[in-house]
Image: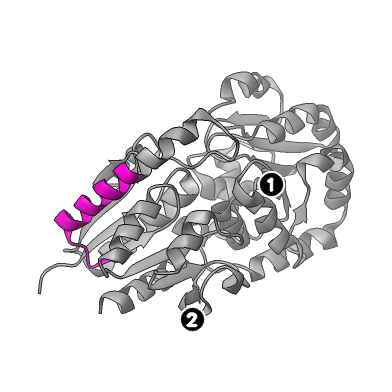
Amino acid sequence: MKPYKFIISGGGTGGHIYPAIAIANELKLRYPDAKFLFVGAKDKMEMEKVPQAGFEIKGLWISGIQRKLTFKNLSFPFKLISSLWKANSIINKFKPNAVIGTGGFASGPTLMMANRKGIPTLVQEQNSYPGITNKLLSKKASKICVAYDNLERFFPSEKIVKTGNPVRQDLLSIHTKTEEAKTFFKFDEKKKTILVLGGSLGARRINQLIESQLEFFKNQEVQLVWQCGKLYVDEYKKYNDLENVQVHQFLNRMDLAYAAADVIISRAGASSVSELCIVGKPTIFIPSPNVAEDHQTKNAKSVADKHGAILLKESELDTFSIVFETLMKDKGKQENLSENINELALPNATNNIVNEIEKLIK
C-alpha cells in the first residue's frame, strides 16, 4: 500500500499554526512513512514556523478582505483567483488522501479545491464563533472538529465532533514543575506571581494597563512575569530594572511560566483559552476587541459564564485594580475559578482530531 499523503493548511497567527503542526506530528507518529505538505499565505508567519517544525510548505498569494473600504480590497479578487488556481495545481501534483484546514486565509482556497475534487476534508474550528471562511467551507467539509458547544448555529450538526483544540503536551504536567519554575525565574517563593500574556506580537492595551499599574502591583507585593510581545519589547524592557518585574518579548518555556503563576492576565485567543483550561489557574481575560466577529470576547464569555474566569473588557479597564485586589484577597474565589476552568479542559484534542482523520482515510 502506498504511504498516506496529507495536505494541512492553516496560518496567519500562532493560534492557527500550532494546531496544524500538532495534528501533523500526531499523524506522523501513527504513520511514520506518510508524506506531508503544508499550504500557507505567502507573507505570514507560517512560512517560517512550519519549516522550523520540519515540514515543507508552499505559499499562496492571499490575504483577508478588509472590513473597511480600502484599496487593498481591490486586489482581493485577483488574489483569490490566483490562490484557487495555485491550490488546484498543488493538489493535482501532491494527490493527498485528506486535506485538513485549521483556519487562516490559505485554508479557504485549499479546502475549496479539495472539496471540488471529492477529496475528504476536515475543518478544525478553534473559536466559539467561527469566521466567514470556515462557515463557507463547512457546507462541503467531511468533518468539523470544534472546541465549544452550540456550534450547530453555524455548521451542519451531523458533521460536528467536539474534540477541543490541540495544546502543547508539556502543559499536562505543569503542577509537578512549580519548584523548577520558581528557580528558572529566580523568584521569591513567598510572593505571589502574576503572569501577563498578550500573544506573540503583544497587546497594546494590556501593556499600557500593566505599565500604569506598576506602583499598584508593588503595593500588592506581587511579582510580575510580563510577556509584552515582539512589537513592544523596546518600549517596555526598561522596566526590567524594577524589583519583582520581568519583561519578556517571548516566553520560550511556557510550561514553566504557567507553573510559576498564581494568577494569569491574558488575551482570549482560542489556543490561549484552551491552554488556560488545562493549566487551571485563576485567570482574568482581557479580550482583544479588534478581531473578526469579536470572537475573543465570545471565547472569554463562554468560560466566564461557567464561572471559570473573570472577563474584563478593554472598556472596563478603569476597574482593574478593584477587580484584581478583590481576587487576590479571596482565596475561595481563586480556588473556584481554578476548579471551574479546569473542568472545561479537553486534553486529548490532538488524538481525537487525528482519530477523525483516520475515519476519513480508511
Q: Is residue 97 above or below residue 196?
A: below
Q: Nearer the viewer, residue 45 or 272?
A: 45
Element under disc 2: helix
Label 2 Cα crowd, 10 Å radius (few <14 / some 14-19 / many 20+): few
Residue 241: name its quadrant.
top right
Task: Say which residue appears at 49% left-offset and 75% top-offset.
Answer: 160
Q: Which residue is mark 2?
A: 158
Q: Is residue 67 left or right of residue 306?
A: left
Range of residues picked out in magenta? 81-98
Residue 285 highlighted magenta (yes or no)? no
Question: What is the residue that sits farthest to the left in this orientation?
Answer: 1
Element under disc 1: loop
Where residue 313 sits: x, y (%)?
Answer: 77, 46
Task: Say which residue appears at 29% left-offset and 62% top-offset.
Answer: 114
User: Label for residue 287?
Assistant: 1
Q: Is residue 130 left or right of residue 343?
A: left
Residue type at the position of mark 2? Glu
Quadrant placement of the N terminus: bottom left
Where residue 358 sits: x, y (%)?
Answer: 31, 75
Task: Say which residue appears at 64% left-offset and 18% top-offset.
Answer: 238
